[in-house]
Image (tube, helix red, strand yellow):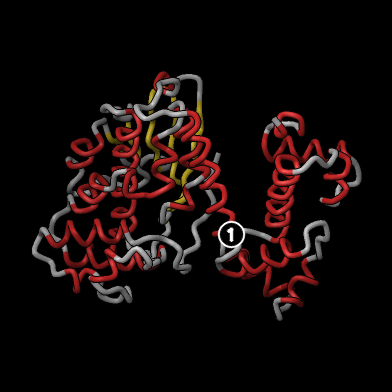
Amino acid sequence: MASTRPLINERIYAPYKIAALVEVLAEQGIAPEDSLKGSGLSVDQLNDASVMTSVRQYAIVARNAVLLSTDPATPFKTGARLHLSAYGMYGYALMSCLSLRDYFRLGVKYHRLATPTVTIDWTEYPNRAVWSFPDAFVSSPSRELREFIIEQQFTQHVTHLQDVAGHSCPPVMACFSYPAPAHADLYPQYLGCPCFFDAPQCELVYDSAILNQKPQLAHKLTATLLQDTCDRLIGQAKTSVGTSGEVYQVLMSTPGVFPGMEEVATRLNMTSRTLRRHLEAEGTSFVAIVDDVRCSLALEYLQSTKMSTDDVAMLLGFSDAANFRRALKRWTGKGPGELRK
């Protein structure tokens, strides 16, 4: 299971990650104004609930940290203080999961709500559960900044799992796709496990025996309500950001009628070639968005109306109910009857 590539310029995230990093740097004597230089943010905005920030703004502050700080533990210290309670609805949804397996799964599903600086995958094997990080978005190709982002991300994962489990739950090992840095001794101190460098890719590996453990705040009704809220927030994010958001809005404005790429491009005053290029830059495609819209509408119709499966299939443009059922199984792993319950 993989998370989507983050959108880097849209201001849709509360500034909690930036605030935590600025706070760590301030403890080293670095003025917040210097930490925020070039980000377009003021110190007062970091505690303003109405202020929204982008992944790029976070990357700018992280780059400033690389340049200004002489403490190699800065990203580790920042990740260690970013508890799930700082993540709003997303954090509480994860803390109320019914098992650690659900936590891993939903951590990926809702990752786009968490100011994502990297893409994450989660894979369960017979004896291990693995977070992997196939890429790391940063606004600069510098090695130092890439490593800073990964160091903070790994520490956040360790911190979050401890928040959910209610006790120390360190990885079995951590792997990094780059050579050991001069401060390599800090890695096991903050991650609590053996660390290996020059690996094929960045991974955090856990013993799969933990997956059935029940989180300390597990609560079925709370989990359901919060996950529904996260689903709506993701839906809102999809329709409010970038070119992909504009495509979502066009497709959702006439459910049941799915215009082709040429027509959507014309409505957005661009060529289909330009539209394709913009969507690729945002890590998606026209086909993927149409698929996502059909899935969202299918769930809405099945769970909120009494329409027959045949009617829903026809409304979503499927040639027959059998093709719709196959698509539904691919999207959700469930059939129409299971989703109506």
Q: Residue at x 81, y 60 (%)?
A: 258
Q: Which residue is mark 1?
A: 238
User: How many numbered marks are there?
Assistant: 1
Quarter in which the N terminus is drawn: top right
Q: Left or right of 145: which side holds 23?
A: left
Front in this rendered view, residue 340 or 150: 340
Q: In the image, residue 206 lies at what x, y percent?
A: 38, 28
Q: Residue at x 29, y 43 (%)?
A: 155
Q: In the image, residue 315 lies at what x, y percent?
A: 85, 51
Q: Residues within 10 Å of mark 1 (few under 14, many from 20)?
A: many
Q: Left or right of 80: which side holds 133?
A: right
Front in this rendered view, residue 259 or 257: 257
Q: In the image, residue 239 lies at what x, y percent?
A: 60, 63
Front in this rendered view, residue 171 or 159: 159
User: Splitting the image into 4 quarters, where does residue 23 fall?
Assistant: bottom left
Is 35 located above or below residue 309 in the figure? Answer: below
- Residue extending farthest to the bottom is 269
- Residue extending farthest to the left is 29
Is 131 located above or below residue 237 in the figure? Answer: above
Circle 1: element type: helix
Q: In the image, residue 169 lies at what x, y percent?
A: 30, 27
Q: Left or right of 104: which side holds 48?
A: left
Q: Left or right of 303: which side holds 226?
A: left
Front in this rendered view, residue 76 or 67: 76
- Residue extending farthest to the right is 319
User: Splitting the image into 4 quarters, where does residue 28 fall?
Assistant: bottom left
Q: Residue at x 32, y 49 (%)?
A: 86
Is 292 located above or below residue 286 in the figure? Answer: above
Is 168 located above or below residue 35 in the figure? Answer: above
For the residue marked with disc 1, what is the amino acid?
Lys
Q: Residue at x 76, y 34 (%)?
A: 336
Quarter in which the C terminus is drawn: top right
